[in-house]
Image: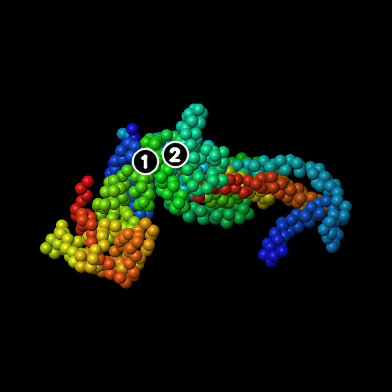
Amino acid sequence: MAEIVIDGIRKAFGAVVALERVELRVADGEFLALLGPSGCGKTTLLRVIAGLESQSEGRVLIGGRDVSRLPPRARGLAMVFQNYAVFPHMTVRDNVAFGLRMAGAEAARTDRQVRRASELLHIEPYLDRYPSQLSGGQRQRVAVARALAVEPSVLLMDEPLSNLDALLRLEMRAELKSVLRAAGTTTIYVTHDQTEAMGLADRIAVLQDGRIQQLDRPATIYSHPATRFVGGFVGSPPMNFLELAAAGGAVRLGALTFPAPADGPIVLGLRGEDIEEVTAGAGFPLAVLVVEPMGSHTLVTGQVAGHRMRVVLPSERLPAPGEDIHLRPLPGRLRWMDAASGAAINPPNP
Amino acid sequence: MTLRRGIFLSGVATLCAWTLVPIWLIALGAVGGRAAVDSWPKSFWPGSASFATLGSFLAIDGVWTATLTSLEVAVLCMIFSILLGAPAGYALARYSFRGATAYRLLILLTRAFPVGILALPLTVSFIRLGLYDTPVGVALIHAALALPFAVLVSASLFQGIPRELEEAAWVFGCSRPRAFLRVVVPLALPGIAATAIFAFVISWNEVFAASVLTVRHRTLTAYLLAVLSESPLHVQFAGGLMLIVPSVVFIFLVRKHLFSMWGIANR
């Protein structure tokens, strides 16, 4: 059992606050993604959990044990670094066996677990090579194998795929997911790539400015962002936001009237694919500016009520720039946000 | 042959000549005897090579003792420089502390004091401490001369080793000292060896401090300065050659360690 509890972790570098009282509970065997733009504190949080950085306040508990003051080696975890950090002066075999040897495991057990980890990541052919003789993707596998070989109860990953090219990243992503599911390891995975977080994680914690903005299942984060920031960060294309004015409990957009939860300035959030095209007069007009055929769909960027909006249309639909198309939101897909704070007004109801 | 290649080759030739011609001329003087030294124009080929001068040089009383002293001093200097310089370099590379930049500058400033000015006070202190006329005493001064180099070179050496490698070692069960020994030292070893060799050569070639601080236990340079100033030219050339050869041989033997053995394959 290795549940991770982050209890009021605060981290300041001098006057700069990197983490502001973060509370987080990761269940045993769960895959949690820490998602956020660079500088949001996600890597700092991971390093605090690993013991590579000391927290200013708060506690970290792993499997019920307070590890806040323990050095990294005593925390019972493994880590995959962004630059892999495989030891260049050791063969792949020695790299993978490193953690076990340092823990003083007997040779038979070391051999067995090294073999299992290398099979899992398909690196058996390279066991006697040096890292400099491997490609980036292979080194990445070595780094993961080194972490899995110790059969850790907790695995921390710091943007492990960010240095791979797009195709390899896609392939490794699927592989990582199946490998980690099989291992049943509690995993915290730091990434700035929202598709990676969506695809891999059981739950996602979205961070901004050292605070967790939202912690939920990927589908909920996507469909019910807790703040304007989350909606804009998660999803490709990001959620559209229209700053409108509500009066008498309603907002008008083109020929449509939507019941608004509050009067005054309000933000309407709408995902690009949550619309349907209708005939003129049955929706709101979008003045088309750019059309991008993506193969599986067509991405249309246009202007509505003075706001930029990106919508997703079927791939066979290719409107011409300059044309007006008429759209209507799908029922139940409108999200309302406070114009000042950006917080969602109708919180997700799971 | 393209122009670019021509420029490259002539550059190589110039650099080689820059180092090798003086050594060759000294060697000629050493093996050519009195006649070759006095002749003009110089011939670039020894007319009659003979190792007689070298032999007689080696037979000079005290040359072997002085050589041994030189070796002892140089090895001690090497050890002192690495033992003190590598940790200082590591600290400069890994920890940001108040005044780190000033400290770097200060290290360089130690070379700003001419040994000539320090000679008298040093001699007095060394006599008081019982270090005067001992190899350890000379090695300490030589280490002081070699240290700025050792500190700054090892700092850049450690800076070149990604911190993540050390962090990975910590995560996978190493204490800090153990991670240093298992990961940092093997990767830094070629560079540290190079630093050590430079410290050795600095000590081997140093003559002023060695002359001032010793009387009976002279290093080879100090001994030759004292003895050879009265000797004929060809014997001086023989002495010069004997001083050059060990440093060249030493650097030649460890030349492959001067280049990184694995290359830091991290990205």
Dot 2 falls on a residue whose secondary structure is helix
Q: Residue B121 location, x and y as percent?
A: 59, 49
Q: Residue A106 location, x and y as percent?
A: 49, 27
Contact? badges 1 and 2 (CB < 8 Å): no
The residue pinned by badge 2 equals: A147
Residue B244 as seen in the image, left or right of residue B169? right
Q: Chain of mark 2?
A: A
Q: Say if residue A343 shows up in the picture.
A: no
Q: Which quarter of the rendered picture does the N terminus of chain B lie within?
A: bottom right
> Does A257 appear above or below B264?
below
- Viewer-nearest residue: B84 or A18: A18
Mark 2: give few (<14), some (14-19) or many (20+) Cα within 10 Å.
many
- Viewer-nearest residue: B218 or A347: A347
Q: Residue at x 26, y 48 (%)?
A: A220
The residue pinned by badge 1 equals: A187
What is the quadrant of residue A311 in the picture? bottom left
Residue A281 as seen in the image, left or right of residue B262? left
Residue type at mark 2: give it. Answer: Ala
Q: Residue at x 11, y 63 (%)?
A: A248
Q: Say if residue A132 shows up in the picture.
A: yes
Q: Residue at x 37, y 54 (%)?
A: A38
Q: Residue at x 27, y 67 (%)?
A: A325
